[in-house]
Image (cartoon, rainbow, N blue to C red):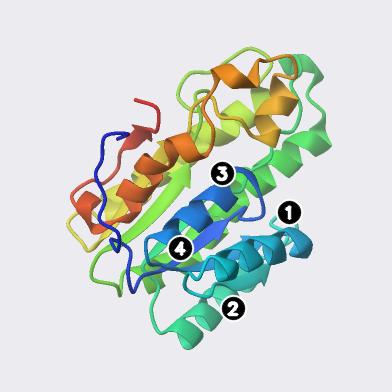
């Protein structure tokens, strides 16, 4: 994926939703999609962060984005349906969505998992993704070539000690992606999951506080895969787990 060659306007005239767009990989993906021509809809829970990304995009002379403040821990299915309806009403079409937002919870032995942390991780990483995907699919299927991109992890297909809630949630994410991809196989909508790999983000720093950040990828380093999977060049790719770092 890192060898994918893009054209300057490969996302021109596309409208793309990015969740967790306030910082980290979500912010970088939003900036990248805008750079390549997309109108980006920035979803996150912290308005100040979203406004900063908005300002950066506008200052760079890129297509003006939109902001959707939403806390995925408390949002209901109806909130997501209303949001997608508003997007379609305003932009007339939706061509892609990167479901990037998730929470780590805590690293702990399985027998010591806190029930509230478990519930929070499942709510944000699984239930909210399901609600959002249910709302997005009817809109995305109207586009000629649409991409729904979930975010998985290295612990999303092989469990790791002490990563209980997060690992289980990413197994569920991959399963959800495969179910939807199979249902829409052969349509104009493709559904995949991307594993960013070891990347310098706040979540990574929480999980590995002593790690040498100079030895892992930056968010910019992994963007070729994110860009490829959102572009029409990937229209034949469906139901796949893609590693952004090889």
Position of 228 relative to 1 (above/below): below
Q: Which of marks 4 and 3 is in front?
A: 4
Q: Can residue 100 be seen in this view?
A: no
Quarter of the figure that contains the N terminus: top left
Q: Which of marks 2 and 4 is in front?
A: 4
Q: Which mark is residue 82?
A: 2
Q: Which of marks 1 and 4 is in front?
A: 4
Judge left or right: residue 17 versus residue 214.
Answer: left
Earlier sequence position, callout 2 versus callout 4: 4
| Circle 3 residues within 10 Å: few <14, some 14–19, many ≥20 | many
What residue is shown with label 4? 34
* Distance Cα–Cα, label 1 vs label 3: 19 Å
Q: Nearer the viewer, residue 54 or 112?
A: 54
| Circle 4 residues within 10 Å: few <14, some 14–19, many ≥20 | many
What residue is shown with label 3? 25
* Distance Cα–Cα, label 2 vs label 3: 26 Å
Query: Measuring 51% from the left and 37% from the top, which residue is drawn there?
Result: 172
């Amino acid at each position: 994926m890192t060898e994918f060659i893009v054209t300057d306007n490969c996302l021109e005239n596309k409208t793309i939703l990015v969740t967790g767009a306030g910082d980290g990989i979500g912010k970088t993906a939003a900036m990248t999609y805008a750079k390549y021509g997309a109108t980006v809809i920035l979803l996150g829970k912290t308005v100040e962060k979203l406004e900063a990304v908005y300002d950066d995009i506008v200052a760079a002379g890129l297509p003006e984005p939109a902001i959707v403040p939403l806390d995925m821990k408390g949002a209901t299915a109806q909130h997501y349906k209303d949001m997608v309806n508003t997007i379609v009403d305003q932009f007339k079409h939706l061509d892609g969505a990167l479901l990037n937002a998730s929470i780590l919870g805590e690293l702990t032995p399985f027998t010591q998992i806190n029930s509230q942390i478990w519930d929070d991780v499942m709510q944000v990483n699984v239930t909210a993704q399901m609600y959002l995907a249910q709302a997005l699919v009817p809109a995305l299927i109207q586009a000629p070539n649409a991409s729904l991109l979930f975010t998985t992890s290295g612990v999303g297909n092989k469990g790791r000690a002490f990563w209980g809630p997060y690992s289980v949630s990413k197994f569920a994410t991959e399963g959800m992606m495969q179910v939807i991809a199979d249902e829409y196989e052969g349509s104009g909508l493709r559904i995949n999951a991307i594993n960013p790999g070891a990347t310098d983000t706040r979540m990574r720093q929480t999980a590995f506080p002593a790690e040498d950040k100079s030895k892992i990828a930056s968010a910019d380093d992994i963007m070729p895969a994110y860009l490829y999977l959102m572009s029409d060049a990937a229209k034949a790719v469906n139901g796949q787990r893609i590693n952004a770092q090889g």
